[in-house]
Amino acid sequence: MKLLFKKIRSLRRSAAKNQILNSEKEFYSAFNAMKSAVWIIDKDHCIVKSNNAAERLFNRSNLEMIGKKCWRIVHGADQPVKNCPLIKAGQSLQQESIELQINDRWFEVVVDPILNSKGKPSKFIHIITDITESKRTSDKLERSQQLLDNAQRLAKTGGWEWNVEDQKMYWTKELYRLHGFEPTEYESGSFEHINASLECYNPEDRPKILSAFHQCEKKGIGYDLEFEFQKSSGKKKWIKTVAEPIWKGDKVEKIVGNVMDITESKSAKDKLVVQSKRIKTFFNSINDAIFIHPLKQEGFAPFVEVNDIACKRYGYTYDELMNLSVPDITVKPDVNGHAKPDYRNKLRKEGHLVFETFHIKKSGETFPVEVNSNIFYKNGKPHILAVVRDITDRKNMEELQIQNWHLKKQESLSRMAAAIAHHFNNYLMGIMGNLELSLKLIELDKSPLDNLIKAMRLVQKASEVNGLMLTYLGKNNSGKMKMDIGKVCNMIMPLLRASLSSNIVLEANFPAHGPMIYGNVNQIQQLVINLVSNAAESYQKEGTVYLSLKTVLAN
């Protein structure tokens, strides 16, 4: 019997030993099959077991690693590195981990302590897992999230997602910031996000935004709305809220949307509207017709804008003028004037052009205009802004001025003719007297030479008076000669004074002699006559004309 029990105990020990051996085989098979590098490290931090993955990772055999400190294999160091998880696990008696970069790969190092009966670490399980791909994926996700956060921050736009089935609401960081909330104030996915957001809208707007949200949730109708908005701090803004449904089959699974801060653009838009109205008012208050049309290489494009004065002055409605172009409002012979190559070239080169032409109204009435054209660019394309002024009154005034000038000229000529006639008559009387005396002296058998010489001198003076009259009329032509310009000017002073009206005084300041010049006497005298005449005509009633001659140094 004893032998039987002994045999049984022997068989049991053998079976237990075989079971242990099998378990060890299974353990080592699993140990070496792991993709992560695994070491079993003793309490003195020396490697006692190493799997195949560790051999491949560090390119060393088990014999080269067994008995070595782990930091010697991993870091090539004689001492533990900073934040070594093995040292930390020995101190904390719990799992420690760290992310480690080796060359261009990233690894996660996890160390678990194995405690003895006294609660002290007897061994450590040291696992190194290659996390390069997951790290890269994580980095990409982190970069994408950072880019999204930055993009939303710069665009002042926050995003949200509503899960219809789970009734969960999720916000981005920027949406919290737009509301003036902290992300920690509300539980992620909480319905309270909706209630808190509604409080930021004006009371009269809350039913509108809530109705739009429910329409999108139940019927899949998106929305794009603008509202005044008040942050939790009390600061008022304008926001644009947009949402659209995400379908799953025939049901709305989610709603995604964003909220954009449009305060600046809204303010700019409002200012633009006010400015546009102001410009429009100014545009229509100008008393000149304004036409805007694209600048074509050849021909004329239809008008794209006109002011109210253009409609009133030309007799067309706004819509009628929008279907017309320059030839339709221009007298036919003058259409080519608008399209002259030199006009177009000058306009393109200098950017502006002023010219006169004749336009025609819807009624057929023609009238003179001054066209002031300027080039400006709209959407990168050249346009012409033409300010067209009705110059009928100006032309009539110019005609009256010409007529008035002719009347004054005739009046001046009459006065000069009377003065010349007076001088001429005096010279004739002197000539006749000397000739009569000469005849009597001949009868008395005396020499008439002195009287004939006197008569000749008077004839010469009469000729000079006649020359001055021709000069005044611009009909005297003579060649150049050396002359005393002061003397030449003095010669015509008596006739000039005689030609002026009694309310105009002529004061002259000429040197007694010189300066000497080489020129045309008649042209110099004509110049002086023109200067005095123009000066006299500039006075409405009375005045004094000052005429002086002096020598100046020219550079």
Image: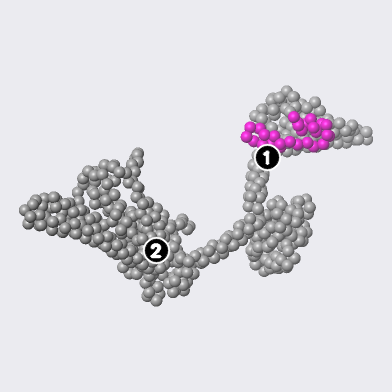
Q: Residue at x 70, y 29 (%)?
A: 74
Labels in figure, total = 2
Where in the figure is residue 272, as x and y percent of width and height?
A: 58, 60
Q: Nearer the viewer, residue 118 or 465?
A: 465
Amino acid type, residue under disc 2 in the picture: Glu
Q: Quadrant of the C terminus?
A: top left
Q: Secondary structure at mark 1?
A: loop
Q: Secondary structure at mark 2?
A: strand
Q: Residue at x 22, y 55 (%)?
A: 465
Amino acid type, residue under disc 1 in the picture: Ile
Check whether the beta carbons of the residues at disc 1 and disc 2 lie within 8 A of each other. no
Label 1 or label 2, whichever comes before in sequence order: 1
Give the crowd class for mark 2: few <14, some 14-19, many >=20 residues within 10 Å.
Answer: some
Residue 156 visible somewhere in the drawing:
yes
Q: What is the span of residues highlighted in magenta in the rendered image? A: 82-108
Residue named by callout 1: 131
Residue named by callout 2: 370
Q: Nearer the viewer, residue 231 or 293?
A: 293
Q: Residue at x 22, y 43 (%)?
A: 482
Where in the figure is residue 404, as x and y percent of width and height?
A: 35, 65
Q: Residue at x 54, y 65 (%)?
A: 281
- Relative placement, left or right, of 403 versus 63 is left
